[in-house]
Amino acid sequence: MPIFEYHCAKCDKDFEVLVLGNQSVTCPDCNGKKVKKLLSVVSHKSDGEFSSSQGSACSGCSATSCSTCSHS
């Protein structure tokens, strides 16, 4: 599935969206059209353990980025 991550310049939020073809992308929170495609990280599960190209998770949770869990 072509799910991409974006950042909205208007409301300063990150979001994911399923993009099909040449579909235009708008922010789901504020309907802003000034969005920037982000570089997504790759992860996979092997022998019951997850591995990510981003590195280790933050100390507050098991997410691979603090934008996911809002931990600072």
Image (cartoon, grey):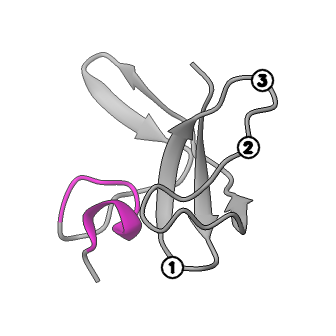
Q: Earlier in the sequence, mark 1 or mark 2?
A: 1
**Residue 44: quarter of image:** top left
- Amino acid found under the numbered disc labelled 1: Cys
Secondary element at image label 3? loop
- Amino acid found under the numbered disc labelled 3: Gly
Query: To which residue does mark 2 refer?
Result: 24
Which residue of the protein is positioned furthest toward the bottom in this rendering?
72
The residue segment tinted magenta is 61-70
Q: How far across and down, in percent of the image, does residue 57 sit? A: 33, 59
Q: Quadrant of the N terminus?
A: top right
Secondary element at image label 1? loop
Task: Identify the residue at horizontal 52%, vertical 79% (top origin).
Answer: 12
**Residue 48: quarter of image:** top left
Q: Is residue 63 magenta?
A: yes
**Residue 11 - label:** 1
Query: To which residue does mark 3 refer?
Result: 21
Which residue of the protein is positioned furthest toward the right in this rendering?
22
Q: How far across and down, in percent of the image, does residue 63 sit? A: 30, 54
Task: Identify the residue at horizontal 26%, vertical 64% (top origin).
Answer: 69
Q: How far across and down, in percent of the image, does residue 34 sit? A: 72, 69
Q: Earlier in the sequence, mark 3 or mark 1?
A: 1
Task: Identify the residue at horizontal 62%, vertical 25% (top origin).
Answer: 2
Q: How far across and down, in percent of the image, does residue 14 sit? A: 49, 64
Task: Identify the residue at horizontal 60%, vertical 65% (top origin).
Answer: 7
Question: Of residues 28 and 2, which is closer to you in this image?
Answer: 28
Q: CA distance from mark 1 to mark 2?
A: 18 Å
Secondary element at image label 2? loop
Relative placement, left or right, of 72 versus 16 is: left
The crowding category of the residue bearing disc 2, from other C-alpha atoms within 10 Å (few below 14, some 14 to 19, many at least 20), is few
Question: Of residues 7 and 55, which is closer to you in this image?
Answer: 7
The crowding category of the residue bearing disc 1, from other C-alpha atoms within 10 Å (few below 14, some 14 to 19, many at least 20), is some
